[in-house]
Amino acid sequence: MNWLLVVVGGMVGAPLRYLTDRAVQRRHDTVFPWGTFTVNVAGCLVLGLVSGAVLAGAASSQVQLLIGTGFCGALTTYSTFSYETLRLAEDGAKFYAAANVVASVVAGLGAAFVGVTVAEALWA
Amino acid sequence: MTTPDARMVEEPTDPDVDLRVPAQRQRSWRAQAPIVAVVALGGGIGAAARYGAALLWPVAAGGFPWTTLWVNAVGCAVIGVLMVVITDVWAAHRLVRPFFGTGVLGGFTTFSTYAIDIQRLVDAGEARTGLAYLAATVLAALAAVWLAVAATRRVLTWRQR
């Protein structure tokens, strides 16, 4: 049952990342990988909300597995993030490569902290 | 005076597909459906593999999240190999990259768990461990993808000689 929750969450999160990336990239004529940035930050926010809700006792461990481990885990990605960073650096866009790392980590962490804080304010 | 912004809004974002034409919208969906399906399939497999790793190598609360770090580093190394192979040598089927790169590896690696791991460590008063983990993951992931790309290119040029 636990495995099924993770797999189902992953099967929704990954295609949502693909579709979001496409939708975001076609609206931005830039080398900066806004699509991956968007899904990573959004996933951190949702996982923060779920983690805060679980800590406050408002969400079950099943929700954690489905939305947290499955959905958010697959919605966000480290492999595409690091590959896109490498591509930027190799293409001579060293500033964008560094900015991608710093912005993703700062915004992702910020979103996670905001998510947990909001969830605690709502349910604790 | 015509505003350039209004003209840009009028222009289709993808010149090949005019989404206002129902037939083209349908064709676009028909082309996307198999890609979305294999990304979903790969995402389920990748997420399950990550969950399996977390069960095999559990990390104590407040401890250094080695499992997530390794998962992310391994995923970054594999995508480095994959991308060089499918762009430089192997004329892969058009669904290989969506399935394996976007689906399996994207579902296997995670940015959200990474961020929440740091948040938990800071919350538990282990800010120093959190900071070390923050930096170690970034360095490991970038080193993994860079080394994998460089090594794969070297192997391929050596084989071609």
Image (cartoon, coloured by chain):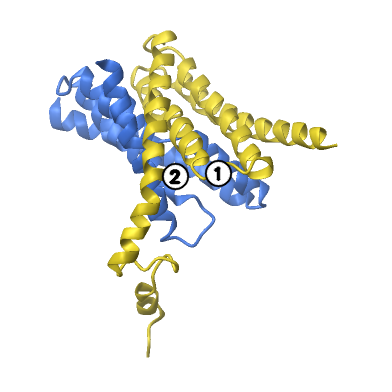
Relative image position of residue B52 (x, y in whole percent): 40, 15
> Can I make out residue A41 in this image?
no
Q: Which chain is blue?
A: A
Q: Nearer the viewer, residue B35 or B68?
A: B35
Tell me the number on the disc at residue B120.
none
Q: Residue at x 41, y 38 (%)?
A: B39
Q: Nearer the viewer, residue B11 or B145?
A: B11
Is residue A92 positioned above or below B54 on the image?
A: below
Relative image position of residue B44 (x, y in whole percent): 37, 28
Question: CA separation, marks 2 and 1?
Answer: 9 Å
What's the residue type where badge 2 is placed? Thr
**Same chain shared by disc 2 and disc 1:** yes
Q: Which image quarter: residue A83?
A: top right
Relative image position of residue A111 (x, y in whole percent): 34, 38
From the viewer's perspective, is A9 left or right of A74?
left
Is residue B60 positioned above or below B70 on the image?
A: above
Q: Residue at x 17, y 23 (%)?
A: A59
From the viewer's perspective, is A122 left or right of A106?
left
For the C terminus of chain B, the image quarter is top right
What's the residue type where badge 1 is placed? Glu
Q: Residue at x 22, y 20 (%)?
A: A62
Question: Which residue lies under the disc numbered 2?
Answer: A36
Question: Which residue lies under the disc numbered 1?
Answer: A84
- How many numbered callouts? 2
